[in-house]
Amino acid sequence: MPAETPAPPLDVLSGRRLRLVGRFVGVSKREASAAAERRGGAIDDAAPDLVVIGEAATTADRERAVQEAAASGAECWSESELWRQLGLVETDPLLCEGAVRRLYSPAMLADLVGAPLAAVQRWARRGVIRPACWVQRLAYFDFEEARVAQLLSDLLREGRSLAAIDSVVDRLAAAHPAYDRAIAELPLVIEGGELLVRGEAALRDVSGQRRFDFDEVSDEDAPTVLRMDSLADAEPTTQRERAWRLHDEGTLDEAIDAWRLAMLESPPTAEDHFVLADWLYAAGQSVAARERYYAALELDPEHLEARVNLGCVLSDLGEHQLAVAAIRGALDQHEAYADAHFHLARICEKHGDHEAAAPHWRRFLEIAPESPWAEEARDGLRWVGSDSQS
């Protein structure tokens, strides 16, 4: 059993005046303020001696905060550092279930950063984002990984393909071998659709080349950004890579065919069936998806995402009781699985059973009050309240 980590002192922020800057990822600013005040700190936007910058703060907000802190002599912390100082970052898998409100399942993380779930799963599969812990076989990501996912999602919105983003991340790692994980450890920004490393005096691309604007003659050292042309994606070398490429390009039917061929090359795993099921479901082939989710669970009965997705498919197919049973099976394995409570509540709502949905809406909000799905859960509870009063 791992050794216990000593709890930080209750007055770790005693006498400190804090200013919170930008959007926080781990919790809301209100919760961050309350956590700081419980440890002796006070929020003072006018004259802070400690500036805490949210992990999702914009580049402009971040730079302005750092400059203002330096000018006033205030100390600067990242959101991550604040949580470390307060002892709120749980990394021990044995403690993970107690820390779920500060963690995100893959589906929640996808909604949080505005990326397709398939993209988040891909980044996790490649190790670009790393789970803080696993419960059963379900990954949970903390706010530090959410920051990385947000960066990658921003690149996706800039028009980069998933394959091109893979290439950027690989080039970044190759150019900075001293870092265990350059994508998470280097000061990175996106300018002009390009991922750049912010150095002390200049911006550099992921390969280390300095960026200049050669039309600027007044200050040849000014670090400006030149937009790169889109990276040429390397040709896929395996059937699985080809299938993922087709999926990323939006040709889902062809991707499904390629994935089926890939599964003929070696005995398919539960994850192989799960991926195919997800793609079939996205393509509107619910009956075929149902069978593949079943196949995934036959090989791996503890695949929680497969159980919940199976429940959603069964509900779409009108098999209400089986849908509820599938998701309850996931909750039997992991009661604190917020996604399962959310989808079970939705299924109950869909069939007009608002009272049955209510405890799952409540439990979801207990586990994940800052989830991007929280407002729908609150709406569900308001519906139950109004229904009971009528």
Image (cartoon, helix red, strand yellow):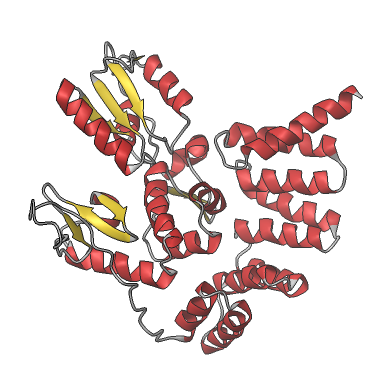
Q: Residue at x 24, y 64 (%)?
A: 173
The location of residue 61, given as percent across then percent down, is: 32, 36
Please give left or right for residue 352 compared with residue 335 in the image: right
Q: Is residue 306 left or right of residue 64?
A: right
Q: Which residue is drawn at 37% across and 71% down?
A: 164
- Residue occupying the point 31% across, 29% down: 52
Q: In this view of the protein, which residue sits in the foreground, 68 or 143?
A: 68
Q: Residue furthest right?
A: 390
Q: Splitting the image into 4 quarters, where does residue 280 fall?
A: bottom right
Pinpoint residue 81: horizontal percent, then vertical percent.
29, 34
The quarter of the rendered structure image containing the N terminus is: top left
- On screen, residue 308 versus residue 43, left or right, reads right
Q: Is residue 170 above or below residue 117?
A: below
Please state the total of marks drawn on the protein image: 0
Residue 4 can be seen, yes or no: no
Q: Considering depth in this image, is 181 or 332 the residue closer to the camera?
A: 181
Q: Quadrant of residue 212?
A: bottom left
Residue 123 in percent (x, y) is at 42, 62
Q: Is residue 320 visible?
A: yes
Q: Identify the residue at horizontal 25%, vertical 22% (top origin).
A: 50
Q: Quadrant of the C terminus?
A: top right
Residue 275 point in image, percent of width and height: 58, 70
Left-right relation of 204 to 163? left
The residue sitting at the top extreme is 15
